[in-house]
Protein backbone atom coordinates (compact mmCIF):
# COMPACT_ATOMS: atom_id res chain seq x y z
CA UNK A 1 0.00 0.00 0.00
CA UNK A 2 2.85 2.38 0.80
CA UNK A 3 4.56 1.86 -2.56
CA UNK A 4 1.30 2.06 -4.52
CA UNK A 5 0.15 5.26 -2.77
CA UNK A 6 3.60 6.82 -3.31
CA UNK A 7 3.61 5.93 -7.01
CA UNK A 8 0.06 7.14 -7.67
CA UNK A 9 0.74 10.45 -5.93
CA UNK A 10 3.92 11.12 -7.93
CA UNK A 11 2.13 10.47 -11.22
CA UNK A 12 -0.92 12.58 -10.34
CA UNK A 13 1.24 15.38 -8.92
CA UNK A 14 3.37 15.57 -12.05
CA UNK A 15 0.22 15.78 -14.17
CA UNK A 16 -1.66 18.19 -11.90
CA UNK A 17 1.14 20.56 -10.90
CA UNK A 18 1.36 22.62 -14.12
CA UNK A 19 -2.43 22.56 -14.52
CA UNK A 20 -3.12 23.97 -11.05
CA UNK A 21 -0.33 26.51 -11.44
CA UNK A 22 -1.89 27.78 -14.69
CA UNK A 23 -5.35 27.73 -13.10
CA UNK A 24 -4.22 29.98 -10.26
CA UNK A 25 -2.32 32.33 -12.56
CA UNK A 26 -5.30 32.68 -14.90
CA UNK A 27 -7.58 33.37 -11.93
CA UNK A 28 -5.09 35.95 -10.59
CA UNK A 29 -4.64 34.07 -7.32
CA UNK A 30 -1.13 35.45 -7.03
CA UNK A 31 1.25 37.46 -4.88
CA UNK A 32 4.75 38.89 -5.20
CA UNK A 33 7.72 36.87 -3.97
CA UNK A 34 10.86 38.34 -2.42
CA UNK A 35 12.18 39.14 -5.93
CA UNK A 36 8.97 41.06 -6.71
CA UNK A 37 7.95 38.40 -9.23
CA UNK A 38 4.30 37.41 -9.49
CA UNK A 39 3.79 33.79 -8.44
CA UNK A 40 0.71 31.67 -7.71
CA UNK A 41 -0.39 31.27 -4.12
CA UNK A 42 -2.55 28.43 -2.76
CA UNK A 43 -0.59 25.78 -4.67
CA UNK A 44 -1.49 23.61 -1.69
CA UNK A 45 -4.66 22.85 -3.62
CA UNK A 46 -2.48 20.27 -5.34
CA UNK A 47 -2.04 18.49 -1.99
CA UNK A 48 -5.79 18.21 -1.42
CA UNK A 49 -6.68 17.13 -4.95
CA UNK A 50 -3.96 14.48 -5.19
CA UNK A 51 -4.51 13.11 -1.68
CA UNK A 52 -8.23 12.72 -2.36
CA UNK A 53 -7.58 11.05 -5.72
CA UNK A 54 -4.78 8.81 -4.45
CA UNK A 55 -6.39 7.67 -1.21
CA UNK A 56 -9.79 7.40 -2.88
CA UNK A 57 -8.16 4.98 -5.32
CA UNK A 58 -6.60 3.12 -2.38
CA UNK A 59 -10.03 2.83 -0.77
CA UNK A 60 -11.38 1.22 -3.94
CA UNK A 61 -8.40 -1.09 -4.44
CA UNK A 62 -7.98 -2.32 -0.87
CA UNK A 63 -11.51 -1.92 0.57
CA UNK A 64 -10.30 -0.71 3.99
CA UNK A 65 -12.32 -2.07 6.92
CA UNK A 66 -11.68 0.93 9.20
CA UNK A 67 -13.07 4.40 8.61
CA UNK A 68 -9.68 6.08 9.11
CA UNK A 69 -9.12 6.72 5.40
CA UNK A 70 -12.50 8.39 4.89
CA UNK A 71 -12.18 10.44 8.08
CA UNK A 72 -8.73 11.61 6.98
CA UNK A 73 -9.97 12.60 3.50
CA UNK A 74 -12.95 14.51 4.89
CA UNK A 75 -10.79 16.22 7.50
CA UNK A 76 -8.04 17.30 5.09
CA UNK A 77 -10.62 18.54 2.58
CA UNK A 78 -12.42 20.76 5.10
CA UNK A 79 -9.21 21.99 6.72
CA UNK A 80 -7.86 22.82 3.26
CA UNK A 81 -11.05 24.74 2.44
CA UNK A 82 -10.61 26.88 5.55
CA UNK A 83 -7.00 27.56 4.55
CA UNK A 84 -8.06 28.52 1.03
CA UNK A 85 -10.55 31.02 2.47
CA UNK A 86 -7.72 32.59 4.48
CA UNK A 87 -5.52 32.75 1.37
CA UNK A 88 -8.18 34.46 -0.74
CA UNK A 89 -9.74 36.99 1.64
CA UNK A 90 -7.54 36.82 4.75
CA UNK A 91 -6.64 39.90 6.79
CA UNK A 92 -2.86 40.24 6.49
CA UNK A 93 -2.39 43.06 9.02
CA UNK A 94 -3.48 40.97 12.00
CA UNK A 95 -0.75 38.57 13.02
CA UNK A 96 -0.76 35.47 15.20
CA UNK A 97 -3.49 33.33 16.69
CA UNK A 98 -3.73 35.65 19.68
CA UNK A 99 -4.35 38.68 17.45
CA UNK A 100 -7.19 37.01 15.53
CA UNK A 101 -8.93 35.82 18.71
CA UNK A 102 -8.64 39.30 20.24
CA UNK A 103 -10.23 40.79 17.14
CA UNK A 104 -13.08 38.27 17.35
CA UNK A 105 -13.94 39.24 20.92
CA UNK A 106 -13.89 42.88 19.84
CA UNK A 107 -16.59 42.06 17.31
CA UNK A 108 -14.34 41.84 14.23
CA UNK A 109 -14.47 38.49 12.43
CA UNK A 110 -11.30 37.52 10.58
CA UNK A 111 -10.50 34.46 8.51
CA UNK A 112 -7.80 33.70 11.07
CA UNK A 113 -10.47 33.41 13.77
CA UNK A 114 -12.62 31.26 11.47
CA UNK A 115 -9.61 29.05 10.86
CA UNK A 116 -8.91 28.76 14.59
CA UNK A 117 -12.46 27.93 15.69
CA UNK A 118 -13.56 25.77 12.76
CA UNK A 119 -10.14 24.12 12.57
CA UNK A 120 -10.37 23.09 16.20
CA UNK A 121 -13.96 21.89 15.70
CA UNK A 122 -12.76 19.68 12.84
CA UNK A 123 -10.03 18.39 15.15
CA UNK A 124 -12.72 17.49 17.72
CA UNK A 125 -14.81 15.63 15.15
CA UNK A 126 -11.84 13.73 13.72
CA UNK A 127 -10.52 12.93 17.20
CA UNK A 128 -13.90 11.52 18.25
CA UNK A 129 -13.69 8.97 15.42
CA UNK A 130 -10.22 7.66 16.28
CA UNK A 131 -10.17 7.95 20.09
CA UNK A 132 -11.20 5.24 22.54
CA UNK A 133 -11.18 7.08 25.88
CA UNK A 134 -11.86 10.60 27.12
CA UNK A 135 -8.14 11.17 27.70
CA UNK A 136 -7.40 10.03 24.15
CA UNK A 137 -10.10 12.36 22.83
CA UNK A 138 -8.66 15.41 24.63
CA UNK A 139 -5.04 14.72 23.70
CA UNK A 140 -5.85 13.82 20.08
CA UNK A 141 -8.05 16.89 19.60
CA UNK A 142 -5.28 19.18 20.81
CA UNK A 143 -2.65 17.33 18.79
CA UNK A 144 -4.60 17.61 15.53
CA UNK A 145 -5.59 21.21 16.17
CA UNK A 146 -2.11 22.45 17.10
CA UNK A 147 -0.31 20.41 14.44
CA UNK A 148 -2.65 21.90 11.80
CA UNK A 149 -1.43 25.38 12.73
CA UNK A 150 2.15 24.32 13.47
CA UNK A 151 3.39 24.07 9.88
CA UNK A 152 1.88 27.48 9.15
CA UNK A 153 4.25 28.98 11.74
CA UNK A 154 7.18 28.10 9.48
CA UNK A 155 5.67 28.97 6.09
CA UNK A 156 7.62 32.24 5.87
CA UNK A 157 10.50 31.37 3.55
CA UNK A 158 10.73 29.30 0.32
CA UNK A 159 10.62 25.58 1.06
CA UNK A 160 10.76 25.93 4.85
CA UNK A 161 7.31 24.50 5.62
CA UNK A 162 7.93 21.58 3.27
CA UNK A 163 11.26 20.79 4.94
CA UNK A 164 9.73 20.94 8.44
CA UNK A 165 7.00 18.54 7.33
CA UNK A 166 9.48 16.15 5.74
CA UNK A 167 11.75 16.10 8.80
CA UNK A 168 8.90 15.50 11.24
CA UNK A 169 7.09 12.97 9.05
CA UNK A 170 10.26 10.94 8.53
CA UNK A 171 10.91 10.92 12.30
CA UNK A 172 7.33 9.79 12.90
CA UNK A 173 7.68 7.05 10.29
CA UNK A 174 10.95 5.78 11.76
CA UNK A 175 9.31 5.43 15.18
CA UNK A 176 6.07 3.83 13.98
CA UNK A 177 6.85 0.97 11.58
CA UNK A 178 3.76 -0.95 12.73
CA UNK A 179 1.33 1.90 12.02
CA UNK A 180 -1.05 0.64 9.34
CA UNK A 181 -1.78 4.25 8.33
CA UNK A 182 1.76 4.97 7.13
CA UNK A 183 0.50 5.11 3.55
CA UNK A 184 -0.84 8.66 4.12
CA UNK A 185 2.76 9.83 4.64
CA UNK A 186 4.01 7.98 1.56
CA UNK A 187 1.27 9.46 -0.58
CA UNK A 188 2.18 12.96 0.64
CA UNK A 189 5.87 12.37 -0.02
CA UNK A 190 4.88 11.43 -3.55
CA UNK A 191 3.15 14.80 -3.94
CA UNK A 192 6.03 16.81 -2.51
CA UNK A 193 8.74 15.37 -4.76
CA UNK A 194 7.45 17.19 -7.89
CA UNK A 195 6.27 20.21 -5.89
CA UNK A 196 9.26 21.07 -3.68
CA UNK A 197 11.36 22.47 -6.53
CA UNK A 198 8.81 25.22 -7.21
CA UNK A 199 8.65 26.07 -3.53
CA UNK A 200 12.42 26.19 -2.99
CA UNK A 201 12.95 28.46 -6.00
CA UNK A 202 10.11 30.76 -4.85
CA UNK A 203 8.12 30.10 -8.03
CA UNK A 204 4.95 29.21 -6.09
CA UNK A 205 3.56 29.34 -2.55
CA UNK A 206 1.52 26.58 -0.93
CA UNK A 207 -0.53 29.07 1.09
CA UNK A 208 -2.56 28.22 4.18
CA UNK A 209 -4.47 25.59 2.19
CA UNK A 210 -1.16 23.73 1.85
CA UNK A 211 0.31 24.30 5.31
CA UNK A 212 -3.01 23.31 6.91
CA UNK A 213 -3.05 20.06 4.93
CA UNK A 214 0.53 19.25 5.93
CA UNK A 215 -0.08 19.97 9.60
CA UNK A 216 -3.38 18.09 9.72
CA UNK A 217 -1.68 15.03 8.22
CA UNK A 218 1.00 15.05 10.92
CA UNK A 219 -1.64 15.51 13.60
CA UNK A 220 -3.95 12.67 12.64
CA UNK A 221 -1.01 10.34 11.97
CA UNK A 222 0.44 11.01 15.44
CA UNK A 223 -2.96 10.69 17.10
CA UNK A 224 -3.70 7.37 15.38
CA UNK A 225 -0.71 5.41 16.66
CA UNK A 226 1.48 6.56 19.55
CA UNK A 227 0.84 5.73 23.21
CA UNK A 228 -0.54 8.26 25.68
CA UNK A 229 2.83 9.29 27.12
CA UNK A 230 4.43 9.86 23.71
CA UNK A 231 1.44 11.83 22.46
CA UNK A 232 1.47 13.87 25.68
CA UNK A 233 5.14 14.77 25.18
CA UNK A 234 4.55 15.76 21.56
CA UNK A 235 1.55 17.85 22.64
CA UNK A 236 3.65 19.65 25.24
CA UNK A 237 6.28 20.47 22.60
CA UNK A 238 3.56 21.85 20.30
CA UNK A 239 2.17 24.03 23.08
CA UNK A 240 5.64 25.41 23.83
CA UNK A 241 6.21 26.22 20.14
CA UNK A 242 2.88 28.05 19.90
CA UNK A 243 3.63 30.10 23.01
CA UNK A 244 7.07 30.95 21.63
CA UNK A 245 5.55 31.95 18.27
CA UNK A 246 3.66 34.76 20.01
CA UNK A 247 6.85 36.14 21.52
CA UNK A 248 9.76 35.43 19.15
CA UNK A 249 10.42 35.30 15.41
CA UNK A 250 11.35 31.80 14.27
CA UNK A 251 12.96 33.32 11.18
CA UNK A 252 15.35 35.32 13.36
CA UNK A 253 16.11 32.24 15.47
CA UNK A 254 16.88 30.21 12.34
CA UNK A 255 19.02 32.97 10.80
CA UNK A 256 21.05 33.30 14.00
CA UNK A 257 21.90 29.58 14.15
CA UNK A 258 24.48 28.34 11.64
CA UNK A 259 23.16 24.78 11.41
CA UNK A 260 19.49 25.77 11.16
CA UNK A 261 20.33 28.41 8.58
CA UNK A 262 22.24 25.81 6.55
CA UNK A 263 19.21 23.49 6.56
CA UNK A 264 16.92 26.38 5.71
CA UNK A 265 19.00 27.37 2.67
CA UNK A 266 19.35 23.88 1.17
CA UNK A 267 17.95 23.82 -2.35
CA UNK A 268 17.44 27.57 -2.77
Image (cartoon, rainbow, N blue to C red):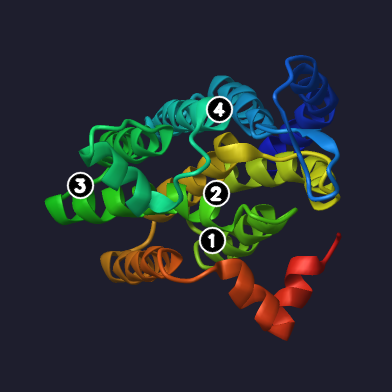
Vertical side of 71 occupied by 255: above or below: below
Label 3, residues with CA under 10 Å away: few <14, some 14-19, many ≥20: few
Q: Is residue 212 above or below residue 262?
A: above
Residue 198 screen position, x and y as percent: 83, 43
Q: Earlier in the sequence, mark 2 or mark 3?
A: 3
> Cβ–Cβ below 8 Å for labels 1 and 2?
yes
| Label 1 or label 3, whichever comes before in sequence order | 3
Q: Counting other residues with Cα less than 10 Å from the Cα at mark 4, is it few (<14), some (14-19), or many (20 or more)?
A: few
Quarter of the image where the C terminus is located: bottom right
Residue 177 image label: 1
Give the CA separation, mark 1 to mark 2. 8 Å
- Position above or below: 261 against 146: below
Name the residue that disc number 4 marks: 62
Helix, strand or loop for disc 1: loop
* Image location (x, y in percent) of residue 211: 57, 44
Q: In front: mark 4 or mark 3?
A: 3
Dot 2 crowding, Cα within 10 Å, few <14, some 14–19, many 20+: some
The reply to whether the C-beta atoms of the residues labelled 4 and 1 are less than 8 Å apart is: no
Secondary element type, mark 3: loop
Q: Which mark is residue 182?
A: 2
Identify the residue position indicated by label 3 in the image: 132
Report the Cα–Cα distance between label 2 and label 3: 20 Å
Amino acid sequence: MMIISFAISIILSCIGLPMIKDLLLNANVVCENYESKTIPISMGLLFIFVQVATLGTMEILFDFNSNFNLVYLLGISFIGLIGLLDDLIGEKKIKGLKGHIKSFFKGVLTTGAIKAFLGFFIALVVSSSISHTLVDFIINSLLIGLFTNFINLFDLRPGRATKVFLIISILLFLTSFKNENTYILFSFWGILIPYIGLDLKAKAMMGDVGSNALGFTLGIYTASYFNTMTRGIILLILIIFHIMAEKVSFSKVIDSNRFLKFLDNIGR
